[in-house]
Image (cartoon, rainbow, N blue to C red):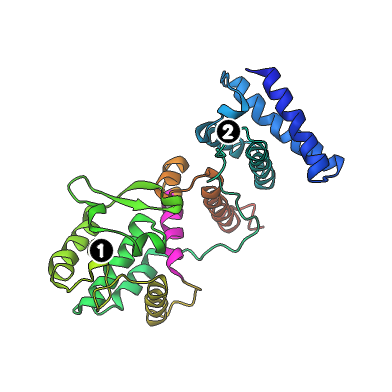
């Protein structure tokens, strides 16, 4: 470990926090202690690098480690401190790009999307008139949202060249234009193939949207607002009282995977989360569900 290099850089960072940002001593001490956790992690991992040599992989592995040890509030504080430190290195001219650029700080205490039961998803899809081109298209879109955990922006931007049917994957362009490959189950894949061959291939498509999978009746790309409307209308027709949005399908996808034993890091990859802390919100949901089972069924809890 390049101890001297880190000590000098940390000292410069502390001066920066005090003189340029005007932080109180207590705040500066918290920043320093949190940053030292990262330095110790690198040391324990036998990673002999200087501050300017830290990569996103180093940061992500550290974030994964603290996610198993610390409360969400502590995790968020440490990540915020890391972002601040590498921003300082940019300001100081030591690096051009921060390894924490795509690192997400989970929003604590936020209201989570509703989780849909499988029966509710089936009921929503059953309300669609699949004898029409638009109705069948909408069915396939909802199935993809649910089966692949896509963001609504990822769905509307899905391209024909992103479909790898033989391999059983779709390529998704997520936040920061980062690509990831998500497995697609055979049944959903067949529905996409049928939509393409019987509907999509026979449409008059706008030139600029020639590679887009899902199109409106005029042959253009669908908008996010259109997907929201389709989901809202299907939920209303199915008499579902929950506050449903396209993100509810993604949320349900992740929750079902976790509750059925999927590894959280695999879920992180499929969702395209840069930080495992964002994925970790689903572990809290499952813990609450487990607690509910205990409260309902354990004899001591029912006393």
Query: Which mark, residue 62?
Result: 2
Q: Identify the residue position indicated by label 1 in the image.
A: 213
Q: Nearer the viewer, residue 110 or 23?
A: 23
Please say if 253 is above or below 8. Answer: below
Q: Residue at position x 83%, y 41% from top?
A: 19
Please say if 142 is above or below 82. Answer: below
Q: Position of residue 288 (x, y in %)?
A: 58, 54
Q: Nearer the viewer, mark 1 or mark 2?
A: 1
Residue 155 horizontal side relative to residue 53, left or right: left
Secondary element at image label 1: loop
Indicate whether residue 14 is drawn in magenta. no
Query: In which quadrant of the rendered view does residue 50 lie?
Result: top right
Q: Callout 1 environment at 10 Å: few (<14), some (14 to 19), or many (20+)? A: many
Q: Nearer the viewer, residue 97 or 7?
A: 97
Secondary element at image label 2: helix
Please say if 103 is above or below 59. Answer: below
Query: In which quadrant of the rendered view does residue 136 lie?
Result: bottom left
Does residue 261 appear in this view? no
Residue 123 horizontal side relative to residue 278, left or right: left
Q: Which residues are magenta?
A: 245-257
Does residue 191 appear in this view? yes
Q: Position of residue 285 (x, y in %)?
A: 55, 55
The main secondary structure of the magenta stretch is: helix
Q: Position of residue 266 (x, y in %)?
A: 41, 42
- Are the residues flagged by discs 1 and 2 in contact, CB closer than 8 Å? no
Residue 242 horizontal side relative to residue 93, left or right: left
Indicate whether residue 246 is drawn in magenta. yes
Q: Callout 2 environment at 10 Å: few (<14), some (14 to 19), or many (20+)? A: some
Query: Which mark, residue 89?
Result: none
- The Cα–Cα distance between marks 1 and 2, rounded to whole angstroms, is 38 Å
């Amino acid at each position: 470990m390049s101890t001297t290099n880190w000590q000098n850089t940390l000292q410069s960072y502390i001066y920066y926090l005090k003189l340029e940002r005007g932080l109180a001593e207590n705040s500066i001490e918290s920043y320093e202690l949190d940053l030292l956790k990262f330095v110790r992690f690198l040391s324990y991992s036998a990673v002999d690098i200087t501050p300017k040599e830290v990569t996103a992989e180093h940061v992500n592995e550290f974030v994964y480690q603290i996610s198993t040890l610390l409360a969400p509030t502590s995790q968020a504080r440490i990540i915020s401190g890391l972002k601040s430190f590498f921003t300082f290195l940019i300001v100081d001219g030591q690096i051009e790009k921060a390894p924490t650029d795509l690192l997400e700080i989970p929003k604590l205490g936020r209201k989570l999307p509703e989780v849909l039961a499988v029966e509710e998803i089936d009921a929503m899809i059953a309300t669609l008139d699949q004898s029409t081109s638009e109705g069948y298209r909408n069915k396939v879109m909802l199935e993809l949202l649910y089966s692949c955990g896509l963001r609504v922006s990822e769905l509307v931007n899905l391209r024909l060249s992103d479909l790898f049917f033989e391999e059983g994957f779709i390529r998704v362009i997520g936040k920061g234009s980062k690509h990831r490959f998500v497995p697609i189950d055979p049944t959903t894949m067949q529905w996409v193939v049928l939509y393409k061959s019987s509907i999509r291939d026979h449409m008059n498509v706008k030139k600029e949207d020639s590679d887009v999978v899902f199109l409106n009746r005029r042959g253009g790309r669908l908008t996010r607002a259109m997907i929201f409307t389709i989901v809202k209308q299907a939920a209303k027709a199915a008499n579902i009282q929950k506050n449903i949005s396209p993100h509810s399908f993604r949320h349900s996808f992740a929750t079902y995977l976790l509750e059925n034993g999927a590894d959280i890091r695999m879920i992180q990859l499929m969702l395209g989360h840069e930080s495992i802390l964002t994925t970790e919100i689903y572990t809290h949901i499952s813990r609450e569900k487990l607690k509910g089972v205990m409260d309902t069924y354990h004899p001591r809890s029912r006393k």
